[in-house]
Amino acid sequence: MKAIIIDDEIHCREVLRILLEMHCQGIEIVAECEDGYSAITAIEKWNPDIVFMDIEMPGMNAFDTLQKIDTIDFHIIFTTAYDQYAIKAIKFSALDYLLKPIDADELIASIKKVRDHEQHTQLQQVQQFQHHLDKPDEDFKLILTNTEGSFFIPPGEIIYCEGRNNYTCFFLTRNRKILCSKTLKEFETILCSHGFLRIHKSLLVSINFIEKFSPAKAVVILKDNSELSVSRRRKEEVINALFNR
């Protein structure tokens, strides 16, 4: 697989190159770029399978650069120093990222993810990413990706999410279900700012779909009369959330 590393800091490019050479067989680094302008030229020349891209670069950042590429038919793995705002946008858009300083195990996991999923990064995901950076709370849709494709789901259509080990099952309006290979914890970080409440270690529920809470049975009753268990340590939090909504 052909890879391009894009980062304005030379030592970051060197570290990533060394980690790839040491731990990721079958990855050929065909170019290293220090800015968005040279990155565009390299991508057009080499037609890479993977692009490692720093988010903040002088002149053009990652999104300015991607906007100028006609066809994004490669995997993107963003590399960034810890920036909660940017990472939240990345998670919204179901894109992959590595935090600097890059950990070898996380790099190996990202490469495995690329190899396990043959489809390339979709332009829609990149556009969604940029939208969430510019307008994080406007027209928000959660991107849910599985073997069937990518689904853009508004929070208002999500009734609740159920964690199943390393998977999360989304129960949606109109009797729809979508299973994703991400943990409930990852989605909790995203959805709690959109009216979702953790009621159990394996359940995240939209407050808008809760009709009432039954302390005697320790359940929330949804608008369709179905019931979901509330853990003992979450009871007070649930009561406060419902009282103040």
Image (cartoon, rainbow, N blue to C red):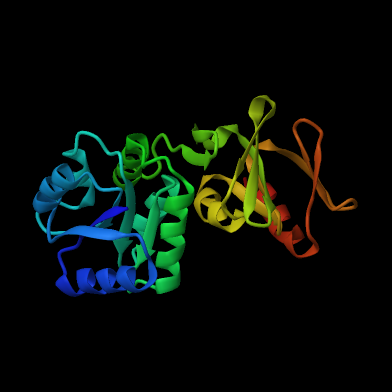
For image coordinates 66% across by 24% down, the residue present is 174
Q: Which of 115 and 146 is in front in this view?
A: 115
- Name the residue furthest right: 216
Q: Which of 161 and 211 is in front in this view?
A: 161
Q: Which of 88 and 5 is in front in this view?
A: 5
Q: Horizontal and vertical percent for residue 134?
A: 29, 44
Quick check: can you spot residue 163?
yes
For image coordinates 37% across by 58% down, the residue present is 97
Q: Horizontal and vertical percent for residue 191?
A: 54, 48
Quick check: can you spot residue 100?
no
In this rendering, the answer to whether 114 lies above or below 130 is below
Q: In which quarter of the image is the C terminus?
A: top right
Q: Horizontal and vertical percent for residue 128?
A: 36, 39
Q: Nearer the viewer, residue 138 or 237?
A: 138
Q: Horizontal and vertical percent for residue 66?
A: 22, 43
For image coordinates 22% across by 51% down, the residue present is 62
In this rendering, the answer to whether 87 lies above or below 74 is below
| 144 horizontally vs 198: left or right | left
